[in-house]
Amino acid sequence: MLAIGLAPSIGAKQLLEDAAQDAERRATADNPGARALMPGFEPHPDADPDAAPLPSAATLSQDWENLPEECSGEFAPAEGMLEGSCRMTDAPDGAPVIIAAGNSRLAQTAVSLSGPAQENGWRLIILRAPSCVFTPGIDSYLGAECDAHNDAALEYIDQVGPEAVAVSTTMVLHEGPERVDRVTEETVPALLGDGVDVIALRDAPRIAENPVVCLEAGGTAEDCTQPLDRGTMPEGRPDAAVLEDLAARTEEDGGGEVLPVDLLPITCPRGACPPIIGNIHVMFDEDHLTATYMESAGPEVERQLEDAGFRW
């Protein structure tokens, strides 16, 4: 009798799980995003050619990084200043940890680490401070509050003791060429010396005009594609020599690994910045990549990390 009574609820649960899996398959089929740029990619045979791009118009302008959990328990920040700016993925107890620290642009890029981290049993933590570039120990242009947040973020990294830390090691300002971020001067060498792997993320591009405005005015994806300013972001990253030097020093002295990750080839492929790739919006304004597109970039991030010698 118990089995008979439970059968409908078990069946309903199975239907829900099957529906969720089907929705996930459908999203990948209709909205592959950055996966569409991977070698050997073939469109799903059931892909809907008329499927709407993601994120939807209702959520596009607020497609921020939003990892599923606030930092709590053993991962709760001891410093109150970090409350509200620390979020994490779920993971088993004792799972290895990656902490990404930086401004909102870094946080958006770091979303690309969430899928690989979860698939490999790691926990991703993102510390986001709007407009505040992560340069602890160095006075920022934003002043004392940003400086205090950076110091608190570095203390949090020491508190948690992660296996890897992800930071932007280049910086793209509103004017002038991309440059080496000053986090490479003291913080990155110190982390490496402590045996922490450093994921050196290249900064995201900035584009001249908001692509969403162009699309909403009736422009096609082709109409709204903008050229990448190579005077600002050349093909080669400007921190390459610095990262090579840091890697050589850690190889000689021991310590963590330097792991460069450059997503410019999948945000502005071949020097052009389309508003939509693989039926997913790439950016929601002139300065920020969408979290949805960065989630789709997980396989590319995993490939680059493994090519650099990283092992989950």
Image (cartoon, rainbow, N blue to C red):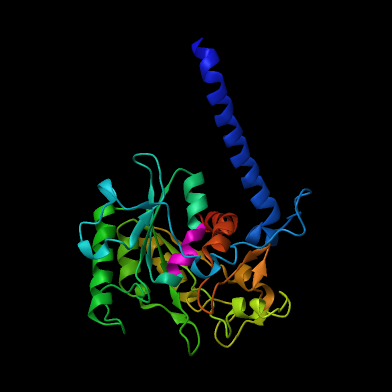
Q: Residue furthest bottom?
A: 176
Residue at x-position 37% and y-position 73%: 130
Examine the rendered structure and indicate whether residue 174 appears above or below residue 63.
below
* Between 257 and 304, the one nearer to me in the picture: 304
Residues rendered magenta in the picture: 106-112
* Between 2 and 168, the one nearer to me in the picture: 2
Spot occupied by residue 196 in the image (x, y as percentages of width and height): 35, 57
* Between 235 and 241, the one nearer to me in the picture: 235
- Residue 153 lies in the magenta-colored region: no
Spot occupied by residue 272 in the image (x, y as percentages of width and height): 67, 78
Name the image quarter holding residue 191. Answer: bottom left
- Residue 108 lies in the magenta-colored region: yes
Position of 71 compared to 80: left or right?
right
Examine the rendered structure and indicate whether residue 219 appears above or below residue 116.
below
Work out whether residue 214 can be spotted.
yes
Name the image quarter holding residue 85. Answer: bottom left
Name the image quarter holding residue 91. Answer: top left
Residue at x-position 43% and y-position 72%: 169
Q: Main secondary structure of the magenta part?
A: helix
